[in-house]
Image: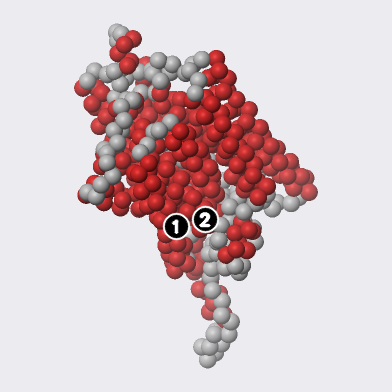
Amino acid sequence: MATSGFLLYLLSASSIAILSVLYLSSPSSSPSSSFVLSDSLSTDKIWPDLELSWRLVVATVIGFLGSACGTVGGVGGGGIFVPMLTLIIGFDTKSAAAISKCMIMGASSSSVWYNLRVAHPTKDVPIIDHDLALLFQPMLMLGITVGVSLSVVFPYWLITVLIIILFIGTSSRSFFKGIEMWKEETILKKEFAKQSETFVNSRGELLIDVEYDPLIPKEQKTALELMCFNLRWKRTSILLAVWISFLILQVVKNDVAVCSPWYWILFSLQFPVAFAVFGYEARKLYNEHKKRMEAGNLEHICEASIGWTGTHLAFCALCGIVGGTVGGLLGSGGGFVLGPLLLEIGVVPQVASATATFVMMFSSSLSVVEFYLLHRFPIPFALYLTSVSVLAGFWGQFFVRKMIAILRRASLIVFVLSGVIFASAITMGIVGVSKSITMIHNHEFMGFLDFCSSQ
């Protein structure tokens, strides 16, 4: 019921925002007015020099904290990086989005490297759910390409409103999810405290040494053994094949004229690639779920606690595309939707974080390669901030897992995720409102733009 209400909120609020474009658009505007755009669509590159200054120090601190918290929550942190790069460093919006992808790639890669050497919190299975990764990754990549296209058509104020609606909804939903988990952990700790009293004899001596260990990885294998165990080469190879396919299509598409027949052919080819891989994994999950239900086996197929019915699979496909679309609009890796979604379908926080960062590593690296070929970012600045994110991703995972071990609460990951999304909503809101006010004062066009003429 709560999920239905959340979806109703997103659908109704987004529909109102999109329909309002028709009222805010000026019918008397001439066609040329649509080309008087804000900085978000400007083709002018603004690349500040990489030199020691207070701006660089502040950006380094924000980048480190954003990467650390973003990878722990499995959301990346693009909603923090883009405003930081534009407001503090001074990059133009397109370059900021490209560098943001570099930072997400660095943080998610180091986070994946750390997670590969960590055991599953409760089962003897990989901490990265490759079934869910294979289900969501192609739809996420498809959504990113759609989001990039929509970013050209949608006015900047509409993108801001849609992102704020989504971020407030997902952060609130994740926060309440974290509160529920916190209460459940509290009950479990109290029950264990009562049970532990039975292990004390009449002299007050402890007869059995037991310890409540909620969702804390037990290091029983060596780091190399865990790495080989956590990495499923067959499924990772499929993910890599999808990555290469999308990269080839994007590179070739960038070399043809926008809106030409070959452009639309190459753009359309992304859909069968994404739906073929999604269909392969969805069919596998559906058939396995059906067999288990017929046999009376209620054990879950993967980490998600939902039944893999046609409705649930279609819902996951839609969420994957929406997450990727947000990533394309914002310059993030799509984790702002994927991270909360994994928690919503019953994945434990550690596995949700590890799986989301694993998927984001593919989606963000695809964008980085594409942006590099298009010369969208300065190499020195990108290397520096990527290095900061690599360190932050590793130490963020290390610190939070230590905190979980001390406090015995895996819900910390959920609160971190909620906090990063909410902070992104605030920063993106401030930047978006500021630019929208400027556009209004300059009497700029506030409606939908023409895709072909705006490229």
Relative height, residue 366 to residue 147 (above, below) = below
Relative to residue 188, is residue 312 drawn left or right?
right
Q: CA distance from mark 1 to mark 2?
A: 8 Å
Task: Confirm whether residue 251 shows in the render.
Answer: yes
- Residue at image position (48%, 41%) is 364
Task: Name the spot of residue 256 as percent of width and height, x first.
Answer: 50, 20
Give 439 or 110, whichever is nearer the viewer: 110
| Marks 1 and 2 close (CB-CB < 8 Å) | yes
- Residue at image position (39%, 51%) is 387
Q: Which mark is residue 394?
A: 1
Residue type at mark 1 is Phe
Task: Name the spot of residue 274 as percent of width and height, x first.
Answer: 60, 32
Relative height, residue 350 to residue 256 (above, below) = below
Which picture quadrant has residue 271?
top right
Please tell me how crowded label 1 is: few (under 14), some (14-19), or many (20+) other residues with Cα within 10 Å.
many
Relative to residue 332, is residue 312 drawn left or right?
right
Please tell me how crowded label 2 is: few (under 14), some (14-19), or many (20+) other residues with Cα within 10 Å.
some
Q: Which residue is mark 2?
A: 113
Element type where label 1 sits in the image: helix
For the view shown, which residue lies furthest in the bottom direction? 203
Please identify the quadrant where the C terminus is shown: top left
Q: How is the image coloured?
A: secondary structure
Give 128 or 409, whichever is nearer the viewer: 128
